[in-house]
Image: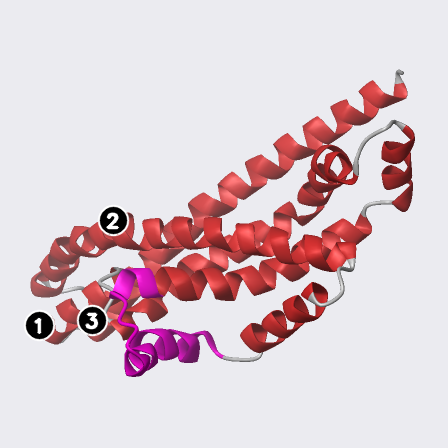
Amino acid sequence: MMDERLAGILADSFFKILLPGLTVTIPLTALSFTFAMVIAIALALVQFAGIRGLKELARFYIWVIRGTPLLVQLFVVFYGLPNLGIVLPPFPSAVIVFSLNEGAYCAEIMRAALEAVPVGQMEAGYCAGMSYLQIMRRIVLPQAFRTAFPSLGNSLISMVKDTSLAANITVTEMFMATQRIVARTYEPLALYLEVGLIYLIFSTVLTKLQSAGEKRLAFYGRRRTLRQGGK
């Protein structure tokens, strides 16, 4: 049976942990994933187009980022760059690292999705008098995005949990808030389970949104197919 002291600690700490989640963890995730998608689409398009030089640079970037731990990347940017005279606050440092890291993984997702679009789609676009950029924007990217959406959704959910690593560079997100409460109350098991529950709530909400998004994209895809078939 949970004693009154522990119950009081959990009740008092819930909103003290949730508040940094809403004001730091969620904004950190949203900003980082937005920038990551910009990086990912750019890298995927460079590789898909086969632009010599840029393609090799993109592959090198992806190789380095995917081959090194996220925690090491955080330490290099926050603790290492000051040796070069580059001092960044904790939150921007976390946004930069998470964006660069997630961008490399999402780039591979987008590249595979682009390559999954039938070549005939490109040829049909050229026959309709479209330019390469118009074909990519109106035909290829929308189809690739529908294919990549489930995997991108999984990456977003994973990023929410990975933001806990930002506590290592003094970003006051949910996990650091929990650590401070643990240091004061000496109740690590209950409090770490509590923060785990809050992460689970966030992930569950995103999972529901992902499922709704997949259904909406599937609906638009079917409607587009029927419209094209009727022409």
Q: x%, y% of residue 41?
A: 62, 51
Which span is picked out in magenta? 69-93
Task: Give the CA separation, mark 2 to mark 1.
Answer: 22 Å
> Does 89 appear in magenta?
yes
Q: Is disc 1 surrounded by few (<14), some (14 to 19) or many (20+) residues within 10 Å?
A: few
The chief SS type of the magenta part is helix
Left or right: 56 in relation to 152: right
Q: Secondary structure at mark 2?
A: helix
Q: x%, y% of residue 86?
A: 30, 73
Q: x%, y% of residue 146?
A: 68, 41
Task: Give the CA separation, mark 1 to mark 3.
Answer: 9 Å
Left or right: 189 in relation to 77: left
Q: Which residue is mark 1?
A: 184
Left or right: 136 in relation to 57: right
Q: Is disc 3 surrounded by few (<14), some (14 to 19) or many (20+) residues within 10 Å?
A: some
Task: Give the residue type at disc 2.
Answer: Thr
Query: Given contact means CB atoms under 8 Å apart, are the residues at marks 2 and 1 in contact?
Result: no
Colour treatment of the image: secondary structure
Q: x%, y% of residue 16?
A: 16, 54
Q: Which residue is mark 3?
A: 179
| Residue 1 visible in image | no
Mark 2 or mark 1: name the one nearer the start of the chain: 2
